[in-house]
Image: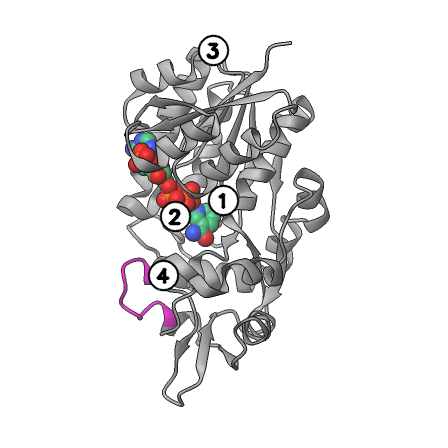
């Protein structure tokens, strides 16, 4: 029997890369991977080709290139890249392009990597958090959630995948422990004692693979994934154990976090406030047992730290 081809947007990145590697690691699983990249000659693309992926050129700003890249595919993994440009409008436009291309190519199953439109919980006139970029509360969430309707509106058979905070942000996003004024390593998480659903970025792609394997039963459904739900104190304790030195939880209020001044601090301050204030909904929407059923190799924070602790810069 021929294998079902999955076209993967963002294949040289964290989420898409995890999916390509998950497909290729399971040669008897019945799926094949097509890795989309703007640069098929780049080092990461060549690495995926070496593992057995078909590598094709595509740009999510160019519907023609996507139509070609989706042609003949059973499934497509769609993701946008907020932190490359900080523009929710661009994410919406790229989601539209991907939905159009998936429809034109007759793709049978799209997994859309999305997040909540927080304005459904905190309307724009709600003063609890500032409105950003004119019409968003959490710009990098809201446009993804708004874009869900674009996939449905195009009649694309879609699974809406609500992802979680990558623990890899401690390596790549400046969120690792830093020395505080008292000389102690401090892990800043502006969520008081509320739990943050987190996940190893690699596990998002592995869960997406689980969704493609389940197929029709998850089309039209919204699913959420996480590796563990931990509060700041629990994450600091796990960091202390893994690093062999004390790490304390730095609980600054979101109002203060928003003023930190790095690009996107206001967006992330609002995001953490949303996750803090709607903890019960937000954790409930990311069930751990369900995530593990999609991806039996799902890592806990301690397991992720065991493999990655040396990569966390300690400021
Ligand atoms: N950090 C977190 O905790 C977190 C949690 C949940 C969701 N997210 C969301 O995850 C998304 C990013 O996903 P990621 O982390 O997997 O991304 P990533 O690791 O930054 O990788 C993105 C890849 O996408 C490709 N790309 C960028 N622009 C493109 C374009 N115009 N056309 C085609 N490909 C393009 C690039 O590949 P080439 O250069 O090879 O083309 C790049 O390797 C963001 O929207 C973010 O909001 C992040």
Q: Which of 267 and 188 is in front in this view?
A: 188
- Residue at 44% in and 43% down: 14
Which region is colored magenta?
257-265
Q: Mark 2 points at which residue?
A: 140
Lower position in the chain sequence, tag 4 or tag 2: 4
Q: Which is more N-terminal, label 1 or label 4?
A: 1
Identify which residue, 267 or 98, lies in the foreground. Answer: 98
Q: Visible in this render: residue 160?
A: yes
Callouts 4 and 2 close, C-beta under 8 Å:
no
The residue where tag 3 is placed is 72
- Mark 4 or mark 3, whichever is nearer to me: 3
Q: Where is residue 138 in the image (x, y as percent from the top left)?
A: 40, 53
Residue 91 seen in render: no
Q: Is residue 205 left or right of residue 86?
A: right
Label 1 within 8 A of ligand 1 by Cβ: yes
- Taking the magenta stretch, the answer to whether it contains residue 269 is no
Instruction: Indicate yes or no: mark 2 CB to ligand 1 under 8 Å.
Output: yes
Q: Is the magenta stretch mostly helix, strand or loop?
A: loop
Q: Name the residue under label 1.
A: 115
Q: Which of marks 1 and 2 is nearer the N terminus?
A: 1
Answer with the quarter of the image where residue 65 lies. Answer: top left
For the C terminus, give its image quadrant: bottom left
Mark earlier in primary sequence (3, 2): 3
Query: In this figure, which residue is indicated by the disc labeled 4?
Result: 130
Q: What residue is at 43 percent from the left and 58 percent from the top?
A: 169
């Amino acid at each position: 029997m021929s294998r079902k081809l999955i076209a993967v947007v963002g294949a040289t990145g964290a989420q898409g890369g995890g999916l390509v590697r998950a497909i290729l690691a399971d040669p008897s699983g019945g799926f094949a991977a097509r890795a989309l990249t703007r640069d098929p000659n780049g080092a990461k693309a060549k690495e995926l080709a070496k593992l057995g992926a078909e590598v094709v050129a595509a740009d999510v700003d160019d519907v023609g290139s996507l139509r070609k890249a989706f042609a003949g595919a059973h499934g497509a993994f769609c993701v946008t890249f907020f932190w490359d440009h900080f523009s929710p409008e661009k994410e919406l436009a790229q989601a539209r392009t991907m939905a159009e291309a998936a429809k034109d190519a007759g793709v049978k199953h799209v997994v859309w990597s999305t997040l909540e439109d927080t304005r459904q919980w905190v309307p724009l006139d709600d003063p609890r958090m500032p409105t950003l970029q004119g019409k968003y509360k959490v710009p990098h969430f809201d446009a993804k959630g708004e874009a869900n309707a674009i996939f449905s509106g195009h009649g694309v058979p879609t699974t809406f995948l609500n992802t979680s905070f990558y623990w890899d942000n401690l390596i790549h996003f400046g969120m690792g422990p830093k020395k505080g004024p008292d000389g102690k390593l401090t892990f800043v998480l502006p969520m008081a004692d509320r739990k943050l659903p987190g996940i190893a970025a690699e596990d998002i792609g592995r869960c997406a693979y689980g969704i493609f394997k389940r197929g029709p039963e998850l089309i039209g459904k919204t699913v959420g994934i996480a590796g563990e739900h931990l509060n700041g104190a629990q994450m600091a304790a796990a960091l202390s154990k893994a690093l062999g030195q004390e790490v304390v939880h730095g609980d600054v209020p979101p109002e203060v976090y928003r003023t930190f001044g790095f690009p996107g601090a206001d967006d992330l301050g609002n995001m953490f406030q949303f996750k803090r204030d709607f903890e019960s909904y937000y954790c409930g929407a990311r069930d751990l047992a369900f995530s593990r059923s999609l991806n039996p190799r799902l890592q806990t924070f301690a397991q992720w730290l065991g493999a990655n602790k040396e990569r966390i810069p300690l400021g």
